[in-house]
Amino acid sequence: MIWVYGFLIWLVMELIINLMYHFLISKNMNPGEKRGISIFKGVLERLFLITGILLGYPQVIIAFGALKIGTRFRNSEKGKVSDDYFLIGNLVSLLAVMLFIWVLGFF
């Protein structure tokens, strides 16, 4: 039952954060910027950190910091990887591993 309350709290906080983002940040964005990917990245980052902390893996904070730093490095123009896809892909992979370990804990 605690997971249901945790999910509801997370959902309410996401709504509040995204409303604040909409009113405060969208006024300063350039017209060509993609707002949807920024919102998705923020939701995924918070979901990753909350899930890791709740499952008892404080190391997610270190992994998250390393991934954020990794997106700041630039590759050569030939092998350039999009920072968004790099961050999202790695966060989804780590989140899947944490959830897989959590599910295995039931057996």
Image (cartoon, grey):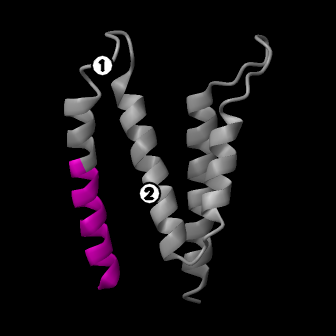
Binning the other alpha carbons within 10 Å of mark 2 as few (below 14), some (14 to 19) or many (20 upward) gives: some
Which quadrant of the view contains residue 26? top left
Q: Residue at x 56, y 50 (%)?
A: 92
Q: Please, is residue 49 above or below residue 74 in the view?
A: below
Q: Which mark is residue 28?
A: 1
Q: Secondary structure at mark 2?
A: helix
Magenta stretch containing residue 9, yes or no?
A: yes
In the picture, the quarter occupied by the C terminus is bottom right
Mark 2 or mark 1: name the one nearer the start of the chain.
Answer: 1
Magenta stretch containing residue 14, yes or no?
A: yes
Q: Residue at x 71, y 37 (%)?
A: 70
In the picture, the quarter occupied by the N terminus is bottom left
- Residue at image mark 2: 47
User: Residue 16 location in percent, x, y?
Assistant: 21, 50
Secondary structure mostly seen in the magenta stretch? helix
| Type of the residue with mark 1 | Asn
| Type of the residue with mark 2 | Leu
Q: Please, is residue 18 above or below residue 59 in the view?
A: above
Q: Name the side, left or right, on which 62 lies relative to 85.
A: right
Give the magenta part as a residue range: 1-16
Q: Residue at x 37, y 10 (%)?
A: 32
User: Residue 81 location in percent, x, y?
Assistant: 69, 24
User: Residue 13 location in percent, x, y?
Assistant: 26, 57
User: Residue 41 location in percent, x, y?
Assistant: 45, 40
